[in-house]
Image (cartoon, rainbow, N blue to C red):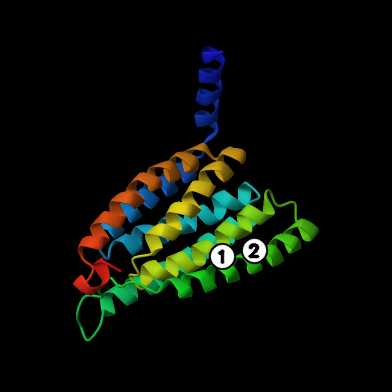
Amino acid sequence: MIRELSVQLVSVWHDTSWIELIAAGLAIAYLVLAIGQHISCWIAAFVSSCLYVWVFSQAHLYMDSALNLFYALMAAYGFWQWQQGKEGMQLPVTRWPLPKHLGALALVFLLSLITSSILRRYTPAALPFLDSLEFWASIYATYLVARKVYENWHWFFVIDALCVGLYFNRRLFATMLLFGVYLVLIVIGMREWRRTLPAAHVSA
């Protein structure tokens, strides 16, 4: 049993494309740099996202592919936003109120129902609702990162936990492991960004 599983895992890794491996490596670099609030994180994000557009389209995860196109655009926006800051100063970490996030969550579910229905009808998309849910939630969470909103880490923890199952289902094992690493790094990111919050926001 263990031997058969080992053989299957070796076979899977042989089937993993070098493009997926590079994209996964750059994605880890992005998150590590983002934890330290280094603006170069957006360069790694841009290249990784461009590569993942192709990877996910090959896996029939069309919303994931479109999401990474959005990520590439947001990488450019995030680079500009972090570089600008406020009045020439580094953009600070802030928090947004819970009602704002709950409103976003309701909108994410509504949009996910709409797009998953379209995908089921017109494409051979795999797991259309989960694919759509990840897409819309990640759009909001990525915008939070670009604005340095602390709660982005909470959003991405839930999103990435769902993604581990999604990518296992589609046999994207390098990417599945990437998102497992993400879950650990997200906890570190929460701690590091919390340290830079203004005192008034820490206890909120």
Residue at point 55% right, 32% down? 15
List the residue tagged with mark 1. 136
Q: Where is residue 99 in the image (x, y as percent from the top left)?
A: 47, 74
Helix, strand or loop at mark 2: helix
Q: Position of residue 191 (x, y in %)?
A: 26, 55
The image quadrant where one finds the C terminus is bottom left
Three-letter amino acid code at disc 2? Ser
- Look at the numbered discs 2 and 1 and tell me whether their residues touch, using CB distance below 8 Å: yes
Please give left or right for residue 72 compared with residue 166 in the image.
Answer: left
Residue 106 is drawn in which quadrant?
Answer: bottom right
| 73 versus 123 height, above or below | below
Specify few, some or many for label 1: CA neighbours under 10 Å numbering under 14, 14-19, or 20 or more.
Answer: many
Please give left or right for residue 151 compared with residue 83 in the image.
Answer: right
Three-letter amino acid code at disc 1? Trp
Choose the circle earlier in sequence order: 2 or 1. Answer: 2
List the residue tagged with mark 2. 112
Give the residue at the far front of this rendering. 203
Residue at point 44% right, 49% down? 23
| 7 versus 149 height, above or below | above
- For the residues labelled 2 and 1, the Cα–Cα distance comes to 7 Å
